[in-house]
Image: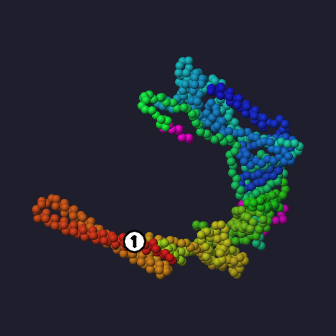
Amino acid sequence: MNVRALRTVRTALLATLLGVAAAQSSPTDAQLLGPDDLPVVRMVLGTAGVATFEHEGTVQGDRELVLDWPLDAMDDLLQSLVVQDLDGGTVGSVTYTARDPLDRILGGYAFDLRDAPDLARLLQQARGATVVVQGPDGLATGPLVAVERDSVGEARDAWHATVRTERGLTRVPLTGTTTVRFQDPDLQAELDAALAELARDRGEDRTEVRIRFDGEGERRVRLSYVREMPIFKTGWRLVAGDDGEAALQGWAIVDNPTDLDLRGIELVLLAGRPIAFVTELLEPVHVPRQRLAPPVATQRAPDADAGVVAEMGADAVADAMPAAPAPMMARSAPQLEGAGVRAAAEAAASDGGVAYAYRLRDPVDLERHRSALIPIVQATVPAERVVTVRPTGSDATPYAALRIENVGDALLPAGTVTIYAEDGFAGNALLGDVPPGGERLLRYAADPAVRTAVDARRETEQVVGVRTGGGNLITDVRTRDTTVYRIARDDAAARTLIVEHPFRSDWEWVAPAPTPERDEDHWRVRVDLTDADGGSASDAEAHLACAPNEECLLEVVLERTEARTIRISDQSPDRIEVLLRNVDLSDTDRRALEEIVALQRDLADLDAELRDLRTRRDDAVREQERLRESLAVVPAGEPLHRRYLDDLESWEDRLNDLRLEIEALEDGRSELQAELTEAVRTFGDGI
């Protein structure tokens, strides 16, 4: 099909498709609605990078809502949109502008611009078309025969176009070419259309979405969808008092980077960890299909007739036919309580208990491309002043901290905490998500008066139990891990030091008692740093008391017991004798091991004797070979010849004796090895 015919078919098809689309999406009896007719009334903003938007309004009769929608938000809309036409109405249709991948669109044009071709590659696609080329030597008009590159001489890699002109074949260097024009208007239109598609794809970032509501009378309609949004961020302010409590105030930072003006909406902040992903639904997905050639009957020339040889029966004819083919989160300190700030939200667990919702009591205005700082928590929480240290490598810095507890009914979302003391700013801390009943340590400043270091660490092992069976010795080995922390300080102020010792899931806590509390990764050992009079800062039970002006040692002991299997057959006699001296065995097992050791030693002695006999045998064989070589050079009848014969016979006798001894020892060794194998196999049986 030529370019003109292809263009005609494409134009007709496009007109048909546009007519169908217009019939479906441009109703003659439905009035159009804009976003202001169905405003956002509620937004649920979470910590997964998306928000749920809910629109609500009333319609009269048949209506169609038209939304100018960002392309990058279309996949979320398509995978989450929920539309309701209440009070007897129906949702007629939801349509939007389809988008085929650019590569696929460009592939349908006469010129393939997908890989940004240069002039030479572009012209190669137009061979045979009539072109007008303005080259360095003038104008050349005619069919384009070829586009080729020189590969030799000074003009290497220079491209030329060959055009059949009235003067014959003319080579036009593309380096000096200023203008190329196609005389065929349809071909030029194809190039213009492909370029237009490139421009459209680069500049288009929005699409139109139409939602049809069909029905009679006034009705309520709603729609909701999920859209990508910045997560809400939580900033905390905390002022600790001397009574074991602290004023905690939380503010949520909410951003609206969209083109939607959110006025008077209900805002819900959802603290949780939902899973959110985007499915690519906007672009059509084309499944590649296998291309098959149409079936063609196989033809073959008939063979030459060789004449009748004999008559063939029906069975013989059937056997001769070819087989069918097979199918194929103080004082100068700020006042947080009673200062006119109240939490603007009520918090409660959501259905299912996997998230906590902070629902703002009053409507919120949040214009497009604006952000807001909203108070969501105003509470008093238990707060204990402590010093914490978590030795890691060479760092053993003690930090002043507050141990707070969430005594409320909702999760406290993760965020940065600004801590104020009597004299103002005390430091910043990081707060992770704190569920109801949970507690966290807020480390906010180094404590220069307390010094800690890991003084020593060692592991020891002890066999605490022995079992036998199936030729194995199974020992229960207890490993003790001891870490010594050295603690000193330069003042006499009473406070609690919490040493955070690494938690290891397969180890048990042994000392000091009692077993301390822990988080997911560390045991928390409490050390009472008393004042000069022995007074404590806390009533909680401590693992160690440390007075001023003294250096204290905190010894942390962990243990674990593991079973180790020793295969007796893999042990040397010396190793088994070590086990006999160091492992508490029953009399039966001890005698069995002693017998195994005796058999191993007897077997070792036999092996040594066999090695000696085999060496002597090999020496005898070599001596015989030497004598035979000597006999070959001494004439028969000479006295020396006779002497060599006598020596050869003597060595043969010795060799026979050695062979007999070796065979006897090998038989004895086989019996001894069988006895040892059986003793090892049955070791510990019946115990």
- In the image, 16 versus 424, the foreground residue is 16
Q: Position of residue 268 (x, y in %)?
A: 79, 56
Q: Is residue 397 above or below residue 25?
A: below
- Name the residue tied to disc 1: 674
- In the image, 96 versus 46, the foreground residue is 96
- Residue depicted at 65% across the width and 25% down the height: 4
The answer to whether one can see residue 179 in this image is no
- Residue depicted at 72% across the width and 71% down the height: 385
Could you tell me how many numbered marks the image carries?
1
Residue 316 forms part of the magenta stretch: no
Query: Disc 1 marks which amino acid?
Result: Ala
Q: Position of residue 575 (x, y in %)?
A: 44, 74
Which residue is situated farthest in the right direction here?
A: 217
Residue 323 forms part of the magenta stretch: yes
Q: Position of residue 345 (x, y in %)?
A: 81, 59
Would residue 587 be found to the left or right of residue 80 on screen? left
The answer to whether one can see residue 44 in this image is yes
Residue numbers of the magenta segment: 318-341
Would residue 537 be found to the left or right of residue 175 on screen? right
- In the image, 181 versus 18, the foreground residue is 18
Element class at badge 1: helix
Which residue is situated farthest in the top direction here?
A: 166
Q: Position of residue 282 (x, y in %)?
A: 70, 43
Q: Is residue 254 above or below residue 138?
A: below
Q: Identify the image quadrant of the N terminus.
A: top right
Q: Is residue 532 above or below residue 399?
A: below
Would residue 436 be found to the left or right of residue 180 on screen? right
- Residue depicted at 60% across the width and 67% down the height: 392
Q: Is residue 32 above or below residue 41?
A: above
- Residue depicted at 41% across the width and 75% down the height: 573
Callout 1 crowding tier (Cα within 10 Å): few <14, some 14–19, many ≥20 = few
Would residue 587 be found to the left or right of residue 407 on screen? left
